[in-house]
Amino acid sequence: MLSSRPNSLADLFVTAPNTPLNLGQPLEPPRASYLTSAPETAASPRDSYAESSDNVSPSVQENEKRHTIAYGQESRAEPGLENPSIFRRPLFWLIAFAVVAVVVVAVVLPIYFVVIKPHNYSTNGASVGGSGSGNSTSPTGITTTGGNGSLITVADGMTFTYLNPFGGIWVDNPNDPFNNDAYPNSWTPPLNSSWTWGVDKIYGVNLGGLFVLEPFITPALWEKYPGAIDEWTLSTLMAADTASGGLRQIETHYSTFITEQDIAEIAGAGLNWIRLPIPFWAIETWDFEPFLEKVCWPYILRVLQWARKYGIRVNLDLHTIPGSQNGFNHSGKSGSINFLNGVMGLANAQRALDYIRIITEFISQPEWVDVVSVFSIVNEPMGPTIGTDQIKTFYLLAHDMIRNITGYGEGHGPYIAIHDGYIGTEAWANFLQGSDRIILDTHPYFAFFEGQSDWSPIATGTGLSAGGIWPQKACNSLSPGINTSQTAFGITIAGEFSNGYNDCGLYLTGVGGTASYGTACSLFLDSSQWNDTMKAGLHEFALASMDTLQDWFFWTWKIGNSSTTNSVQSPLWSYQLGLQNGWIPTDPRTAVGTCAALGVIGPQFDGVYQAYQTGGPGAGTIVASEVTSYGQFPPTPINGLPLGAIQSLLPTYTSTSAVATLPPPTFSPSPSPSVSAGNGWFDSGDTGLAPTQVQGCTYPNAWDAVSSAMPTALCPSTGGATHVTTSLSSSR
């Protein structure tokens, strides 16, 4: 199959929309019961990207205007009456004190919440400040900020009340759209302050299914197209369905599935991070790939800006890799693994590395570095198929490329998260000692491993007796690996976990997949059937999981309704639904100590990392033995090749194409001319070109080449596709 990428940047990115999208009837996502929404008249669907000039609030609130008018009327003397000295009137002093109080409120409180408070955040968890009203679309140049009880007006004029009992402060300054003063709660540092690994804890959720579609998260899309099993087939069928809008149906999903109110709810739930899965087709597609190219990027920026507004840090997760890194539907295409595996494994790795580079260049810009604090570079590569050494070699190559862009040491670009490749955390002990700020990411799912053969009940009681064996099982199964890895490797997080202690859920095991529980799954598909004991068991299981994982991201924040039942059919996987109905804790800090209370006591990490692991002295000087083991790319061997294959003849691309650059957002109204939005490229010295096909050469199907025949000679024979060999240095 002939593969081709764009050879120029002529096909520009879809820029961030500046007017509301004409999407017809918007999908109305479920809302947490503890947030109230007050609809206002609006001519457009809620949460369009650009803010409308119609929502700009007056400089003085109406109630303040009325107070001013009343004050003016009271202070007028009636004609014909004696006017004694004003200083002798009691009313004067009452008014004077009132004026002083108004000045204090108007001047001191904004200074406190926007300047002082962010640099003196509390760690005691008390609910502090931030009460009252606010507006996110105030006149240009006026910073608005608010906390618990403040009124938020979104882009289309809809409003909701920000309910945050944990002292979080939102900040929105149209004249300074990159303001990083906000924080989600009193125990989390503001975005403009340092995060201390080992002290500050990640309480996070994934925004799964938003930009990388998954059948069990948004089942209605797949129910409409019964032949679809992944985003590849869904996109193909949608594109043919022009009567329903074709692929623009996916843009409607981007626009409506997660809204600003969702991000506000996340902050109000005591959470402080989101993990945001994104696809490589946010950057580009090649001509044989059916995905909706580039359209999601402005919506990704919209989520990042919402996260900034509410003080939430972001782990940006490259969830899909060309050719598929695991064969799962959420890699873009179900089936074979063609990343570092099979005949097109090396060529697909070249593309993946370039996309990692492009994303790194964008998020390392000063406008984004405080918001996007972690970059997960490859989601869930299948280690048993690809090979442990092969993945480690790619990780070292990516590490060096990223740090050559960002520079070395704390404050230079994001932390780099690498997935454990399904080979366990213990396999990564001492990996890349001396590297600069890498994180090991593990995804401990009971549903697909521990729970598949265990039907023990979870609805067994309340309190510490709730949950049957499952809370203790979470503590015993997860704690040793997490605690040991934090010493043997360094920073270790759970980038995904859930309340799914079994594999019950509509499409959870894929469209047409079967659950090990069989017909017994019916109870777990319908949370309206759950009694208090069931909810108590799930609640205790969640607490135990959170306690033992320490730094975690729940998968996922929201599950969409099935179109056939109009209800969530995978409720064990929805954090939002659990908050609304009582099986997810309203304060994640209450999880601390759960395992000890259950009698599960073992070695605990002391919270102190080695200096190089957090960007201190020694960061970037990798020990020589690691470079010797993993410093030669491509790795040998590449698995999945026909017997007798000569690896040097593997198809590769040539780096002769123009590089795509991710564009910055556009704002309405425009900020001050002094505000720079960046140009999408942090390192002006990074001028290398992007991979593309070698002209005149034919390539196997990049997504299905494991069983393809090997080339018998290089193409062209003069070296246009000469094997790429990279030797890595042990020091920066």
Image (spheres, rainbow, N blue to C red):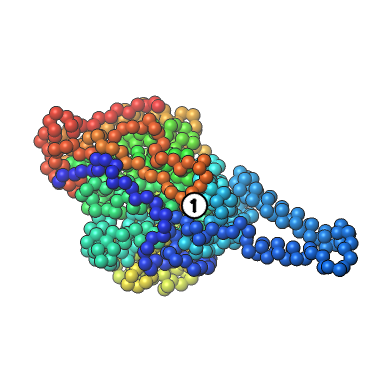
Q: Residue, x 23% and y 31% (percent of image)? A: 724
Q: What residue type is labelled 1?
A: Pro
Q: Looking at the picture, how far across and down is residue 226, in whole percent? A: 24, 66
Question: Dot 1: what SS?
Answer: loop
Return the residue at label 1.
Answer: 669
Residue 504 lies, with reference to residue 625, above or below; the image says below
Label 1 crowd bin: few (<14), some (14–19), many (20+), radius 10 Å = some
Q: Is residue 385 visible?
A: no
Vertical arrangement, residue 108 with respect to residue 453, above or below: above
Residue appearing at x 33%, y 32% in the figure: 687
Q: Quadrant of residue 7?
A: top left
Question: In the rendered picture of this protein, how many numbered marks are placed on residues?
Answer: 1
User: Residue shown at 52%/60% (left/top)?
Assistant: 55
With 220 as the anchor, is 89 left or right in this view?
A: right
Residue 530 visible somewhere in the drawing:
yes
Q: Nearer the viewer, residue 684 or 167?
A: 684
Q: Where is residue 696 in the image (x, y as percent from the top left)?
A: 13, 38
- Answer with left or right where residue 46 lies relative to residue 136: left
Observer-nearest of 369 and 472: 369
- The residue drawn where x is 56% and y is 55% is 138
Whole-percent x, y for residue 322 in the image: 26, 46
Position of 649 compared to 383: left or right? left
* Depth check, front residue: 711 or 133: 133
Hey, which residue is sitting farthest left in the picture?
Answer: 712
In which quadrant will I find the C terminus? Answer: top left
Residue 705 on image: x %, y %: 17, 46
